[in-house]
Image: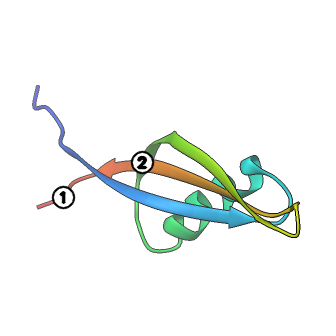
Amino acid sequence: MAGSTYKIIELVGTSDISWEEAAKTAVETAAENLRDLRVAEITKLDMSMEDGKVRRYRARINVSFKYEK
């Protein structure tokens, strides 16, 4: 039985609604160009503010996909 190799990339998704939407945006956008996505790990959450109000949520994630020769 042969093992598998996976590549991990870092993405940042943004949303005006929530961190969950920001992470979903990143994964769904990556899925348009990458095949066989396996795992997404949220590594950092932050937000940008303006005039004392939250304007945008950001989710930094690591996404793995199967590496092919």
Q: Position of residue 43 (x, y in %)?
A: 48, 40
Which of the 4 quarters of the picture holds residue 58?
bottom right
Residue that carries the numbered disc 1 in the rendered image: 68
Residue visible at 42% across and 50% down in the picture: 63
- The amino acid beneath tag 1 is Glu
Q: Return the residue nearer the eye: 41 or 53.
A: 53
In this rendering, the label closer to the viewer, 2 or 1: 2
Q: Position of residue 52 (x, y in %)?
A: 88, 61
Q: Return the residue nearer the eye: 68 or 43.
A: 43
Earlier-in-chain disc, 2 versus 1 = 2
Q: Position of residue 64 (x, y in %)?
A: 36, 47
Which of the 4 quarters of the picture holds residue 47?
bottom right
26 over 1 or under it: above or below: below
Q: Return the residue nearer the eye: 52 or 61.
A: 52
Q: CA distance from mark 2 to mark 1?
A: 18 Å
Secondary structure beneath label 1: loop
Residue 59 is marked as none
Residue visible at 41% across and 54% down in the picture: 36
Residue visible at 46% across and 61% down in the picture: 11
Question: Tag 1: Cα neighbours inside 10 Å, few (<14), some, or many (≥20)?
Answer: few
Secondary structure beneath label 2: strand
- The amino acid beneath tag 2 is Asn
Residue that carries the numbered disc 2 in the rendered image: 62
- Residue ranking furthest to the top: 1
Q: How many marks?
A: 2
Task: Locate residue 38 relative to residue 68 in the image: left or right.
Answer: right
